[in-house]
Image: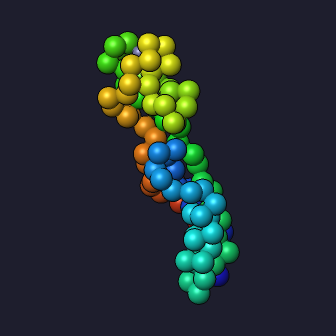
Amino acid sequence: MCRSWWVDPGRGVLSGVDRDGLAFSYEIACEGTFLVGSRLVIETVPLLIYCDTCKTERAPAFIQQIDCPDCHTPAQKIIRGRELEVAALEVAA
Ligand SMILES: [Zn+2]
């Protein structure tokens, strides 16, 4: 039986998903399925915005204050950081 599944979800810092809660829920969801014994690796995706003033992509210093770290214009467009998706699935026999 295969016991070497490796699932890697990308979790954006603004996804609203708690890292520990996701890992705990995954373990419970795997019980009684062929995924028992699999490993969940959670990759945190950092926040990235587009600044209309600087005309470029910027990484805010804090997720509590989503603005450009250079000119402090509030973010109008979030490019990255809201994801919750399976980034990779590795299977070994
Ligand atoms: Zn800016």
Q: Residue at x 51, y 36 (%)?
A: 64
Determine which quarter of the picture holds residue 20.
bottom right
Q: Residue furthest bottom?
A: 32
Residue 10 appears in the rendering: no
Q: Nearer the viewer, residue 91 or 51?
A: 51
Q: Residue at x 60, y 78 (%)?
A: 28
Residue 12 locus on image (x, y percent)? 49, 46
Q: Nearer the viewer, residue 74 or 25?
A: 74
**84 up-or-down from 13: above or below:** below
Residue 73 locus on image (x, y percent)? 39, 19
**31 up-or-down from 7: above or below:** below
**15 up-or-down from 30: above or below:** above
Figure quadrant of the N terminus: bottom right
Residue 17 appears in the rendering: yes
Q: Residue at x 47, y 45 (%)?
A: 14
Left or right: where 3 falls relative to 52: right
Determine which quarter of the picture holds residue 26.
bottom right
Q: Nearer the viewer, residue 84 or 67?
A: 67
Residue 35 locus on image (x, y percent)? 58, 76
Colouring mode (rainbow / by chain / secondary structure / one colour) = rainbow
Figure quadrant of the C terminus: bottom right
**55 up-or-down from 89: above or below:** above
Q: Residue at x 32, y 29 (%)?
A: 76
Residue 13 locus on image (x, y percent)? 52, 44
